[in-house]
Amino acid sequence: MVSIYRQKTYDMGVIRIIEKCIPGNYGAPGQQRNKKQKRTPEDIKKQNHRNRCRKVQLLILGNFHPGDWHLILKHAKDSQPETYKEAVKQRARFLAQMREAYKKAGLTFKWIAVTERGKKKQVLHHHLIIEDIDRNGIRTTELVKKLWTHGGHFFSSLYEDGEYEDLAEYIVKAETKDECGWCTYSRSRGNLVMPKPKVEIKRHRRWRNPPVAPKGWYVVKDSIWNGENPVTGQPVQHYTLKKLITTGKGGKGDSG
């Protein structure tokens, strides 16, 4: 029996994110449409976490590039803020100063940020994803060192051809983020674009599990997720494709 499913493809050049699901008005292959299921609090929590991870991953892929920065801002021992709220205020002041400096240079400042405690609920610090700029008198690394006066800083370059799924997971994980146990990352407004997917309705006997990459691509290890829609009970599949990079010597190299 032929089934109908919806496929969303987010195409970011060397990375493609694929999402497949059975539309709510269709049943799974060979089955009647299922009745809607009542979601448990745990179902909702897991679904919200997956949605936040995917959103941050798409924001990173759509707005930042290899060579941009995963920046960690630290507080010196003698200047640790007394509360989490105060730490967030200090981060906000820093971001405002960065934004103003960029504005004066005719540039926009793109960022994603979250404040975190250490595993022992101590030592507040901040994680940011920012562009690496070296033009119009702005050099990002030097500006950060000048404006962040509360402690040290650590720059880690976003890696080549990264799919950034692990980084997005880290940004949104709640365990050591907000005091209430809920992660609320922040982002610059008005200058970050959310990639739009190509949406297709497919008619096949079933989708492949595990998925098979098209020629010139491969499925990223550990990116495959098979589950079900917590509302409809219908199957869902997510995975990431990465493009194979030609070495230029007649062979093909792994792009990551």
Image: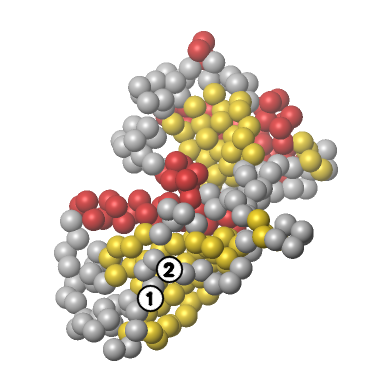
- Residue at 36 percent of width and 39 percent of height: 174
Residue 59 point in image, percent of width and height: 54, 54
**Crowding near the residue tagged with mark 2, few <14, some 14–19, many ≥20 C-alpha atoms within 10 Å:** some
- Residue 70 occupies which quadrant of the picture? top right
Quadrant including the N terminus = bottom left
> Residue 225 shows which numbered tag?
none
Residue 10 point in image, percent of width and height: 53, 67
- Residue at 56 percent of width and 31 percent of height: 72
Residue 76, placed above or below residue 207:
above
- Residue 215 occupies which quadrant of the picture? bottom right
Residue 65 point in image, percent of width and height: 66, 50
Q: CA distance from mark 1 to mark 2?
A: 8 Å
Q: How many marks?
A: 2
Q: Colour scheme in the image? A: secondary structure
Badge 2 amino acid: Pro
Asked if one can make out residue 195 in the rendered structure from this viewpoint, the answer is no
Badge 1 amino acid: Trp
CB of mark 1 within 8 Å of CB of mark 2? yes
> Residue 211 shows which numbered tag?
2
Residue 47 point in image, percent of width and height: 31, 56
